[in-house]
Image: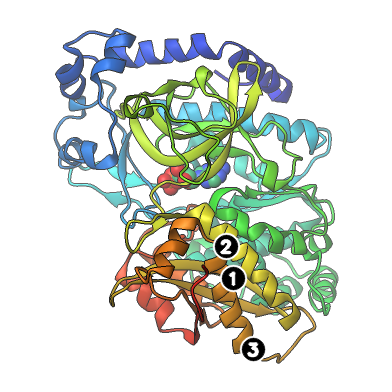
Amino acid sequence: MATNGYEGGLKMIEELTTNAEQIQDEVLREILSRNAGTEYLRGFLHGQTDKQLFKKNVPIVTYEDLKPYIDRIVNGETSDILLAEPITGFFLSSGTSAGQPKLMPVTAQVAKKWELFRGLYESPVIKHLVDINQAGKRMELMFARPEVETPSGLMATSVTTSIFKGSGFRASLPKLYTSPSETIFCPDPNQSLYCQLLFGLIQREEVVMIGSFFASTVLRAIKFLENHWQELSYDIKTGRLSHQITDSRCRNAASLVMKPNPEQADLIENICNCKSWDGIIRKLWPKARYIAGICTGVMRQYTAELEFYSGGLPLVSSLYASSEAFCGINIEPLCKPSDVSYTFLPNMAYFEFLPVKNERDESIEMKSNDEDTELVDLVNVKPGRCYELVVTNSTGLYRYKVGDVLMVSGFHNNAPQFQFVERKSVVLSVDMEKTSETDLFKAVTEAKALLNPLGFILTEYTSYADTSSVPGHYVLFWELKEKEGEHCKELDPKIMVECCFRIEESLHYTYKIYRKRNIIAALEIRVVKQGSFEALMDYCVSKGTSLSQYKKPSCIKSEEALNILDSRVTGKYFSPKSPL
Ligand code: AMP
């Protein structure tokens, strides 16, 4: 089903959200009628397709519960143990939060669903931001992930890679995007980024959007440009690609379009040579109308820095999606990143919601334990409440906990809108206390304000629960940068110690009580050299995560990742006293 232009897309959004309840019922009915005979569902439904029976008998599961079935398919057993439709391969989730990528079955339907989803999430953007009569290209930075062959002979890859491989997408590339497919599929992420920036600069007068899937990738590209603009403008001046680029397919693609353009190179050099990079994106791409990239969840820490480079261009988070399902779209693309809500589309999967008790929000009433675990249908969620998303899809996931916590911010027609709260699994804990991604974000936001007078800004952070000694303690890795124009300032240890204390003070009550009772030892900040988080990203990419998919972990779980940061520590600071 095509969306037939952006007006068609907007109309479809209205229809879908108005008929949300009925569409959800149809989606579930179709999934059950196709798959009730699979080994997995037969065990719970005995061949029946009744919704109430599904709700009563089919358990709520995590990846670990389904893994034995998925592993059997990966190892060559027929996929109809989980789903009736033949599978075409597997999706690999990024695995940056869980540490290990997860494999999910994929069918031919998924690509079609993505095309529809894309048409729908782009419609509000086109309405508000891009004049459809204005010809232009998107400088969207895209990175395919190498495919992995499974013992079944089927390939596993990321959702984004499978989208890039789709014939519809490939056909649209030369007309709509600045990056040729050779650069997107280049196996070396740095060569890929260099070439995509080069193509974006060569076509700078045509670019109407700069973006990537996540905001962090756009920021990484700007930082990469800070280090490579001389080389890039030299290439544009001479019409010859740098010898550093050895990938033959990228070289071929470049040779087709590059010709000496000293005037353009001079303009780029003048812009990049400026003392301040404030607003650099708008200066380099003067016709750009917006910056696209998800700025919610773990990505919100990048918005301030991106705003600095953007020159006032709006930052647009268009969609909320995962390897499990395409879920929601942002129908108000011009709203502030902190206010972004995603309107769920009822035709994408069958969505249920597990109420989440927020320990620190007393306004949320949870009546009995039984009720806590009762799933709520899409149309019955309550504004202001938090839920964990549970998905049933057509590719073998039934009542599957995605691990994301969402808060209902309102409704569009009959479909709820959600703000992304956090990944459920990302918590720091050294005893019985639980510190969430959001708790940490709030506390770090309080503490980093102390760095302002020092002339430093916090560019990246992550955390780690160090339980190697007793009592254990929280460790935060901080990467700092001097503010523009403030060179060679010293990092004052007193202020860093104060930052540690401010974080502790801003954390939740249980943390503070445990600190007071010495169940948790003093919080530590380890300052790392500039570029350390890039090294962490490189490591994850070398392990198979694509740059398009990479989300920096809020909490470090793997030994190797920890070593990467630990080996770059330049200073360690501890909180001087208990916060209570
Ligand atoms: P993956 O497992 O690699 O498919 O990544 C999907 C995950 O990325 C989701 O489950 C979310 O945790 C995160 N994610 C995707 N879209 C958004 C968004 N708009 N805001 C915040 N987090 C998101």
Q: Quadrant of residue 273?
A: bottom right
Disc 3 + disc 1, Cβ < 8 Å? no
Image location (x, y in percent) of residue 238: 73, 75
Quadrant in which the N terminus appears = top right
Disc 3 + disc 2, Cβ < 8 Å? no
Report which residue position mark 1 lands on: 502
Snapshot colouring: rainbow
Report which residue position mark 3 lands on: 492
Who's the residue at 31% across and 10% down the image?
52
Left or right of 193 on screen, residue 185? left
Does the Cβ of the disc 1 residue fall within 8 Å of ligand 1?
no
Q: Foreground residue, 305 or 281?
A: 305
Mark 3 to mark 1: distance in Å? Answer: 15 Å
Q: Amino acid at mark 2?
A: Ser
Residue 506 - label: 2
- Give the structural element (helix, strand or loop) at label 2: helix
- Report crowding for label 1: few under 14, some 14 to 19, many 20 or more residues within 10 A (C-alpha): many
Mark 3 to mark 2: distance in Å? Answer: 21 Å
Residue 198 seen: yes
Q: Foreground residue, 103 or 455?
A: 455
Disc 2 + disc 1, Cβ < 8 Å? yes
Q: Amino acid at mark 1?
A: Arg
Position of 67 relative to 216 (above/below): above
- Please tell me which of labels 3 and 2 falls first in the chain: 3
Who's the residue at 46% across and 15% down the image?
24
Q: Amino acid at mark 3?
A: Asp
